[in-house]
Image (cartoon, rainbow, N blue to C red):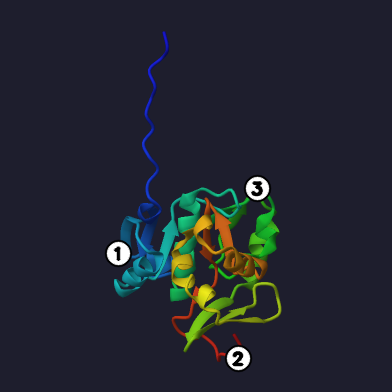
Amino acid sequence: MSSPSVEQAPAAPWSELGVAAELWLDSDPLVRESAGSALGRRTLGGPAASVVTELHRAGVRCLRLAEPIRLCRDAPAASARALTLLREATGQGLAVLWEALCEDGCAADRLFHHLFPPARVLGAPAELAAEWRAGYFPCRCVVRRGPGFVEVRDRRFGTLELFTIDEPDHLGQLDALAEGVPVGEVPPAVRRDFTEVKLVTEQAGRLWWLPMRVRRWPFPSLTV
């Protein structure tokens, strides 16, 4: 007699994947302990940019992500969604308390070193997280829009690299890439060009955009 099959629940749609987080009104550790600063726990779902804008308008200035975020290419969809949220939170100037997880050495590539630095990178040497924190500054890899073009300013790898994107096929993909697009839906030429200059990464079968939107300049633009 064959055993009865067990139906597995379908995976949650990408847009509905939630990120568990604890929220505060202030990033200072002492202030976070004071009455009224803690806003409790929430599961953050929906478009990352909209979620972070809503949090900022509500007064949130610090959040703690409940689960370690895997950085590797084989990361699950939940980690990829958490990274897009982290990108938007960093761009909005929020402090993010989180831990990274890397088991294939990818964290040393500095692909994510423009994001608010983690307390630890599990699976990597301790000095890697220390280097990430020491080298972090706002707007390390940012994108801003002009009329008919987009400019990316990237300092993740030391020197300033400037990229101007003005091809219609490439520009037409940017809004979707910000949230993550199934790899097969991205035109091969667009995927190749963005991958070669490390402006996108592929995780959980999706390609997503790495540079942050500029919300406000923390330094004179030529410094950034």
| N-terminal label among 2 and 3 | 3
Badge 2: residue crowd in 10 Å (few <14, some 14–19, many ≥20): few
Residue 211, x across and y down, in percent: 54, 72
Residue at the image point whose x is 52% and y is 73% from the top: 169
* Above or below for 52 versus 203: below
What residue did someone put label 2 on?
A: 222
Could you say which quadrant of the image residue 5 lies in? top left
Residue 127, x across and y down, in percent: 69, 60
What residue did someone put label 3 on?
A: 103
C-alpha span from label 1 to label 3: 39 Å
Residue at the image point whose x is 60% and y is 72% from the top: 136
Could you say which quadrant of the image residue 110 lies in? bottom right
C-alpha span from label 1 to label 2: 41 Å
**Residue 98 showing in the rendered view:** no
**What amino acid is at disc 2?**
Leu
| N-terminal label among 1 and 2 | 1
| N-terminal label among 1 and 3 | 1
Tag in front: 1 or 2: 2
> Quadrant where the C terminus lies?
bottom right
C-alpha span from label 2 to label 3: 36 Å
What residue did someone put label 1 on?
A: 35
**Pointer 2 and pointer 3: residues touching (CB < 8 Å)?**
no
Residue 178, x across and y down, in percent: 47, 67
Question: SS at mark 3?
Answer: loop
Judging depth in this view, the residue of 118 and 11 nearest the camera is 11
Question: Going by the image, does 109 lie left or right of 209?
Answer: right
Q: Residue furthest top?
A: 1
Judging depth in this view, the residue of 57 and 48 nearest the camera is 48
